Image (cartoon, rainbow, N blue to C red):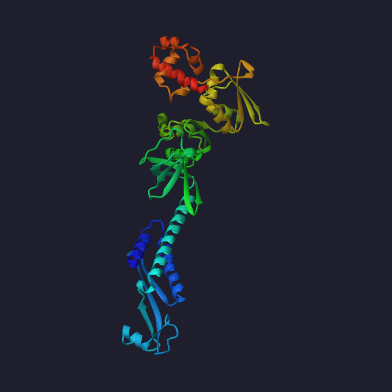
Amino acid sequence: MENINLIDTFAEFKDLKNIDRPTMMSVLEDVFRSMIIKMYGSDDNYDIIINIDKGDFEIWRNREVVEEGEVEDSNRQIALSEAKKIQDDYEIGEELTDEVKLADFGRRAILAIRQNLTARILELEKNNIYNKYKDRIGEIITGEVYQVWKREILVLDDEGNELLLPKNEQIPSDFFRKGDTVRAIVLRVEMRNNSPIIILSRTSSVFLERLFELEVPEIFDGLITIKKIVRIPGERAKVAVESYDERVDPVGACVGMKGSRIHSIVRELRNENIDVINFTNNLQLYITRSLSPAKISSIRIDEENKRVGVYLQPEEVSLAIGKGGFNIKLAGQLTGYEIDVFREADTAVEVEDDVNLDEFTDEIERWVIDVLKKIGCDTAKSVLEIPYEELVKRTDLEEETVKEIIRILESEFE
């Protein structure tokens, strides 16, 4: 029974896909030789034959045939009479080779071998997984959601290895069920309690960069370079790109025909708004582009304190700030400057926040926004300034719809 158990462990070992043949042979032989040394003090007169394909093994011992009564070391010598019982044509001085059965080592030794072999299997597996994923940090991995917990998700790769996607590395609107396919990058690999822990991320800027590489061949081929990416996961991102070929429009290539390339990235990122910006060393132009879609009237740059004063027409202010202040925040991160927005008419007073209605397309249907624009409302505050009853009357929308619009817009300023 112990022999069968050991063979089962060995068979389990040989089926491991991540372990190369020489390593497997070396580890198995090492385990058996360790046992032989422990029992007999030496292993130099033993040959171990391992059959990787069948999943079994043989142990052969070489001993010298000596005269009766001259056996000093039974592990290295055998009496002539004992040798003739194995084969009757042996003579003194010849070498006898016989197979050592596993049962000869005893039950406890066999159990120790099995435990040692199992431990080495686990250790090799762990080291293999660790090394494999350490070399893949920053790469996109596709896996299947195996278990959903409150603080993290357990993901299995195509080889059944366990990967973790923590809650803080998920896009806020991510929602996964068991069996769902998930894409993320390998963020880091660490050893905890001698076990490899592979941490994934969908919020990293590197994830967005890898998605662009997959969707835009010009980036993958090196014709277009991503200079910098900043993002607020699930809300907005800004990507500065530069082309090394004058014939290639970097922004157009990234967006694709009718937005075909960028749309698939936006879907993967749960409708995250992505602004692709043409990089330039001209700081004033770069800041202007970073605040897109707002149109800037003038800029005052304080390079020493890394601050910028941006002056706009009143109707452009909400576009520059963006929903939740995301546009101006990301523009600052992209350029490395603190950006202050001012109305052009009043250069002394910093403007009060307002948000363009186009920023709410993820919460309010486009046709409803168009109805609001038709009555002269372009921003959130311009809608909120109209009394509820009048808004219902002027828009001819359902009362519940108007209540929901007011709730969404008011939550923006809470």
Can the viewer see residue 218? no
Residue found farthest to the right? 304
Q: Is residue 70 above or below residue 53?
A: below
Residue 139 horizontal side relative to residue 85, left or right: right
Q: Quadrant of residue 393?
A: top left
Q: Quadrant of the N terminus?
A: bottom left
Q: Quadrant of residue 398?
A: top left
In the image, 27 versus 101, the foreground residue is 101
Can the viewer see residue 85? yes
Can you give x and y, in whole percent of width and height, for residue 153 in the image? Answer: 43, 42
Q: Tell me what residue is drawn at x 43 percent, y 73 percent.
A: 36
Q: Is residue 187 above or below residue 300?
A: below
Q: Tell me what residue is drawn at x 46 percent, y 40 percent.
A: 151
Residue found farthest to the front? 108
In the image, 243 versus 255, the foreground residue is 255
Count of numbered badges drawn on the protein:
0
Can you give x and y, in whole percent of width and height, for residue 256 in the image? Answer: 42, 32
Can you give x and y, in whole percent of width and height, for residue 85 in the image? Answer: 32, 85
Q: Is residue 359 above or below residue 68?
A: above
Q: Is residue 61 above or below residue 308?
A: below
Can you give x and y, in whole percent of width and height, for residue 345 in the image? Answer: 61, 15
